[in-house]
Amino acid sequence: MKTKYYFDNAATTPVREEVLQAILPYFREYYGNASSVYGIAKESKKALEKARAQVAAAIGAKPEEVYFTAGGSESDNLALRGIAEAYQKKGNHIITTKIEHHAILHTAEYLEKHGVEVTYLNVDEFGRISLEELEKAIRPETILISIMFANNEIGTIQPIAEIGAIAKKHGILFHTDAVQALGHVPIDVEKMNIDLLSMSGHKLGAPKGIGAIYIRKGVAVTPLIFGGAQESKRRAGTENIPGIVGMGMAAELAVKEMEEMTEKLTAMRDKLIRGILEQIPHSRLNGHPTERLPGNCNISFEFIEGESLLLLLDALGIAASSGSACTSGSLDPSHVLMAIGLPHEVAHGSLRLTMDRDNTEEEIDFILEKLPAIVQRLRDMSPVYEDYLKSQK
Ligand SMILES: *Cc1c(COP(=O)(O)O)cnc(C)c1O
């Protein structure tokens, strides 16, 4: 079935039309290597520096504090590995959370095998960390706090400014994975005391395979990739100018339109959440009711499997996700849903619908019209549901 209703914007977004038009000339007209000296190369260099300024402006940073990478995963890897190595004489302890993206969690696990100690903070039932627990976890040898801005599965937004204040008070570097937040939630690295911040292009209407990292001036980071002197020697490799131009433009547009989009998406999100919870018994919202991404709806349905739900939705042309693309295909329930305390079987019945600029009110109505019957159909086939009904008699 062709996808007609795209509700998986947290997994990726289509490239925006304006962005596509802006990047096309950089494939065949201005294809020069930004490190060279002739005409078309100077065009590439100019485009590179314009995009850097656009990304910097989107987060309140200086252009020279923004470095382009090949995506959010690379930025996350660079933040953790780069800081752990550059500050190993100062200490070997990092604090993060149990609900980070795997680009953080698997990097942290790797570092643990190489002598770094990692504390994984718990979250409450809504997916928020406790500032008290964070402060208690700080040791003299703590060099980095890495806590995501907004969660990709349940949409919960962390108290970033408060975390930044704690990190600053203790003289510890603060990194945040802001891949899901950029363009959806106001970000100011100065006011929020953020020292490093990860971004990705394809979650915001730019192409896949382009990302950026903000590194505060004066912070040392050992590079992951060695070679040429690109990106002030922090990330070697000939720059992906089309991707970079797209990322700069997408970031600028998203911030410019944020207020309007937040209003539209929050209204659609809340209508969707309310409609589902009202119509479908034994369903619950995952994540924070208000401190959540404007386009994120994540709901668990008891007695069914999220994977089966996805297949029936796909048959109607609806694209969604059962928690996280990284965990689908495996039998492990999402680590995020486990961390907020869902029992295994409830976590397995979770559905994530994520909306962005192209979604419409009519699409919400379509989902609300179809979903209750689909869930009921799956429950009618479920032995667990049958047992539940018997137990109620
Ligand atoms: C998508 C995502 C990433 C990875 O970004 P890529 O550009 O796909 O490598 C990292 N963190 C979060 C929170 C994400 O949603």
Image (cartoon, rainbow, N blue to C red):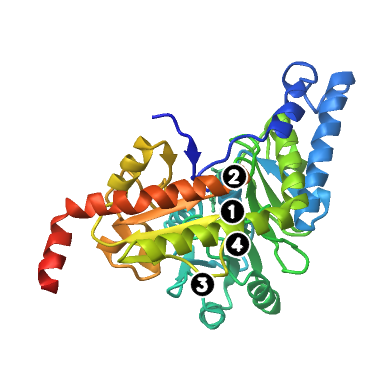
In the figure, is residue 138 to the left or right of 333? right
Q: Residue under label 2, please give it.
A: 203
**Furthest-top residue in view?**
28
Residue type at the position of mark 2: Lys
What type is the residue that disc 4 sits on? Phe
Look at 73% across and 30% down and name the residue there: 241
Judge left or right: residue 26 versus residue 13.
Answer: right
Judge left or right: residue 261 versus residue 347: right
* Whether label 4 touches label 1, CB < 8 Å: yes
What percent of the width, then of the height, locates residue 161?
A: 68, 72
User: Does the numbered disc 2 mark a residue whose Cβ is under 8 Å from ligand 1?
Assistant: yes
CA distance separating discs 4 and 1: 8 Å
* Measured Cα–Cα span from mark 4 to mark 3: 11 Å
* Disc nearer the start of the sequence (4/2): 4
Q: Does the CB distance between marks 3 and 1 fall below 8 Å?
A: no
CA distance for labels 4 and 2:
14 Å
Q: Which mark is residue 149?
A: 4
Q: Secondary structure at mark 3?
A: loop
Q: Are marks 4 and 3 in contact (CB under 8 Å)?
A: no
Q: Amino acid at mark 1?
A: Gln
Mark nearer the N terminus (4 vs 3) = 3
Query: Is ligand 1 closer than 8 angstroms to the Cβ of mark 1?
Result: yes
Please name which of the two marks, 4 or 2, marks the residue nearer to the observer: 2
Mark 1, residue position:
180
Q: Which residue is mark 3?
A: 128
For label 1, the SS is loop
Residue that appears at 73% across and 23% down: 24
Mark 2 vs mark 1, CA separation in Å: 7 Å
Say what amino acid the circle numbered 3 marks.
Arg
Q: Between residues 17 and 232, which one lies in front from this camera angle?
A: 17
3D distance between C-alphas at marks 3 and 1 = 16 Å
Mark 3 crowd level (few <14, some 14–19, many ≥20, 10 Å Cα): many
